[in-house]
Image (cartoon, helix red, strand yellow):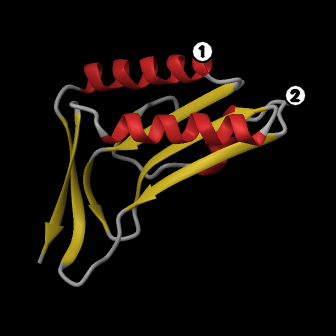
């Protein structure tokens, strides 16, 4: 899985293999999932411009590698129609120490939430 934006399910095993390095002491993983509510049944994820969104994700990865003492970063975001319990996004950060990985992961999640290129809309009954 080399794609940062995909309609396919996210393979966490593949992402962990990609991030994992012998010098690391931790890999922090965040998986955003579609929750199921009383009338909430799913989500529509629109990527206005895939190339621009992938460029933004690549830039965020670079920022995290510069700002934090981390060794590797992977981000994969879904697009299209998702159902309850489907994975929306996966953010993995590998570092020598867990605190650095947690800080970088939180930074990346917060940055993705305000992206202009990735729009999430809840789908109701």
Q: Position of residue 67 (x, y in %)?
A: 59, 19
Indicate the quadrant where residue 101 lies.
Answer: top right
Q: Nearer the viewer, residue 108 or 16?
A: 108
Q: Quadrant of the C terminus?
A: bottom left
Decide if residue 94 is in sight here: yes
Q: How many marks?
A: 2
Q: Is residue 45 above or below residue 23?
A: below
Identify the secondary structure beneath mark 1.
helix
Mark 2 or mark 1, whichever is nearer to me? 1
Mark 1 nearby-residue class (10 Å; few <14, some 14–19, many ≥20): few
Please report the residue visible at 26 percent of the width from the left and 27 percent of the height from the top.
50
Q: Is residue 118 above or below residue 37?
A: above
The Cα–Cα distance between marks 2 and 1, rounded to whole angstroms, is: 18 Å
Pointer 2: what residue? 23
Identify the secondary structure beneath mark 2.
loop
Q: Position of residue 46 (x, y in %)?
A: 19, 42
Q: Position of residue 102 (x, y in %)?
A: 64, 42
Mark 2 nearby-residue class (10 Å; few <14, some 14–19, many ≥20): few
Q: Nearer the viewer, residue 65 or 33?
A: 65
Q: Position of residue 62 (x, y in %)?
A: 53, 17
Q: Is residue 82 left or right of residue 59?
A: left
Q: Is residue 82 left or right of residue 1?
A: left
Decide if residue 17 is in sight here: no
Indicate the quadrant where residue 21 lies.
Answer: top right
Please report the residue visible at 76 percent of the width from the left and 35 percent of the height from the top.
20
Q: Nearer the viewer, residue 2 or 29?
A: 29
Please report the residue visible at 40 percent of the width from the left and 69 percent of the height from the top.
85
Q: Is residue 102 above or below residue 48?
A: below
Pointer 1: what residue? 66
Indicate the quadrant where residue 92 lies.
Answer: top right
Of mark 2 and mark 1, the one earlier in the sequence is: 2
Q: Is residue 102 left or right of residue 25?
A: left
């Amino acid at each position: 899985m080399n794609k940062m934006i995909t309609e396919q399910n996210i393979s966490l095993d593949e992402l962990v293999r990609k991030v994992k390095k012998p010098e690391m002491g931790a890999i922090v993983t965040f998986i955003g999932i579609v929750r199921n509510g009383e009338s909430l049944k799913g989500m529509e994820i629109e990527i206005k411009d895939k190339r621009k969104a992938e460029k933004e994700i690549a830039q965020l990865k670079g920022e995290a590698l510069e700002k934090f003492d981390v060794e590797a970063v992977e981000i994969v975001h879904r697009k299209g129609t998702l159902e309850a319990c489907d994975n929306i996004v996966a953010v993995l950060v590998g570092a020598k120490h867990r605190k650095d990985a947690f800080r970088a992961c939180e930074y990346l999640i917060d940055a993705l939430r305000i992206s202009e290129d990735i729009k999430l809309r809840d789908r109701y009954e």
